Image (cartoon, rainbow, N blue to C red):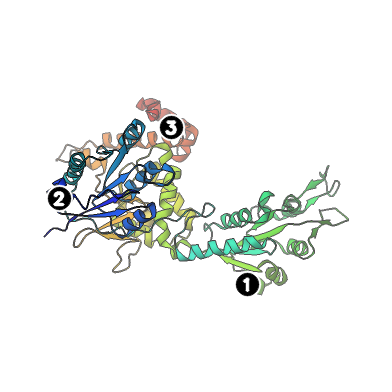
Amino acid sequence: MPSPTRIVIADKEPLGLPSFSSDLDLQFKCEFENVFSEQELLDSLEKQSPQILVIDLEFSIENECIALIKSLKEEHPKTFILPIIPEGQPQQIKQILELDLFYFIHKPLEPIETAIAIRRAYDTLPKEPPAPPRTQAKQLPPFHKMIGNSTSMRHLFDLITKVADDGLSTVLIRGESGTGKEMVAKAIHAQSERSESNFVPVNCAAIPDDLLESELFGYTKGAFTGATTNKPGRIQYADRGTLFLDEIGDMKSSLQAKLLRVIQEKEFEPVGALQAIPVNTRILAATHCDLEQLVSEGTFREDLYYRLSVIPLKIPPLRERIEDIPFLVDSFFEKYAEKRDRKRFSFSWEAMAAVANYDWRGNVRELENLIQHMTILYSGLEVKLTDLPEKFHNVEIPEGYTSIESNPTSEGQSQTEIGNCQAVPAVNPLTETAPWEAGQVDFNELINDFETQLIVQALRQTEGNKKEAAKLLNLKRTTLLEKIKKKSIDGLWEK
């Protein structure tokens, strides 16, 4: 026996539908639930998505119901949303129609109109068992542009908040390359009382040893050949602010001694100066190296190590928080694709399994590069394993692996989601249009079409900048210009 249709009514005042549902002559079995606040509605939907949601446009706080409906429509795509619109509100009707909601009820309610609207909503519902409750975790708000729902990341965010409140102690940020050490440092600075002053990053590995000293400490006029004026260093520039020393493990020993003096004495001497200058700078340091090992080898000062690691913070690698991958993918997709009207794609089960079980040595930066790569070169709707770069093809999938998160749809099947990218059936345009009967495939024509597609996509990505498009395609600019002219596609990417 089919279960009754669940109808949730969101209105600050009870509509009384349950009490006179028999008078509406709905001709199908249903059960009603009244909710009277936005929080009650969200709690109800979290437990189970209804088949029909009747919602008054005067229901939400501060009359932001249109935004609420848009959000609910995305989070509960199988729920039929039936708005109640007060009479004399043509603007609200227009907004509802723009959301592709073509059925609505006028207020004050008339029983016959209400019955017709609910009956129409019921008739449009798929005649199959209702979808199970949505189990996908909601994405928590980014923390200073850092995304993470995992327990390890939420713990890190809590530590950042506590560390920022101190404002004085040095902090040693540890993590593999690509985990976001500078983002953590910026978050500490932004939450601290020093946020109004400068945040000054210095990559100790990127600046040659003979230049790093003058970059950090500055120099006086005449200190060396070519020093024609006084130049303040980055330590002085960070006065009353924050100095972030990235890859501190690569700093040479002589500079380590001078940095130790800055931390201990709160003063520094520019190159060639005879008098120390007081400074109020908070120092944050970061490294992917094992500093304890460097100390034991004698290449890093033990006293500086203990001065730096007053408060140690460790950023977990991506492979230890794979539950964050869907939310990171959504964020990178918005960054690289949605601004250019790129249609959202999904991942097949095999592709998602490979992404989840990849070792991610480059961590979040490597994941970002993957999504950028796919938005430029992939034009389909569903990414299959063979569409991913070759390094993902041989990823070992553990026995019994299901997915990062999986919502069962029927026996023996699952519907995998990555963020909001629901995996839906898709056909590769090439296989869909190619006539695969014997002798009917024109190989050269298909390759030419694919090449044209790549060029147009690259030019859209770079907004018509041919030099940058050539870089994306790893072509010489003259070669790209020749192909554009030969194919007569100049300006096609603007359409």
Q: Amino acid at mark 2?
A: Ser
Vertically, is 33 above or below 471?
A: below
The residue closer to the viewer here, 50 or 358, is 50
Residue density around tag 3, few if under 14, some if 14–19, many if 20 or more, within 10 Å: some
Of the residues tagged 1 and 3, which is closer to the observer?
1
Query: At which x and y percent is residue 72?
Result: 34, 48
The residue closer to the viewer here, 192 or 81, is 81
Left or right placement of residue 46 versus residue 165 in this view: left
The residue closer to the viewer here, 289 or 65, is 65
Query: At which x and y percent is residue 218?
Result: 78, 50
Q: Amino acid at mark 1?
A: Glu
Q: Answer yes or no: do the residues labelled 2 and 1 have beta carbons within 8 Å?
A: no
**Most distant residue in the right direction:** 274
Residue located beneath label 1 in the image:
292
Residue located beneath label 2 in the image:
22
Query: At which x and y percent is residue 381?
Result: 30, 44
Vertically, is 307 above or below 135?
A: below
Numbered disc 3: secondary structure: helix
Q: Is residue 473 visible?
A: no
Residue drawn at (57%, 54%) of the image: 183
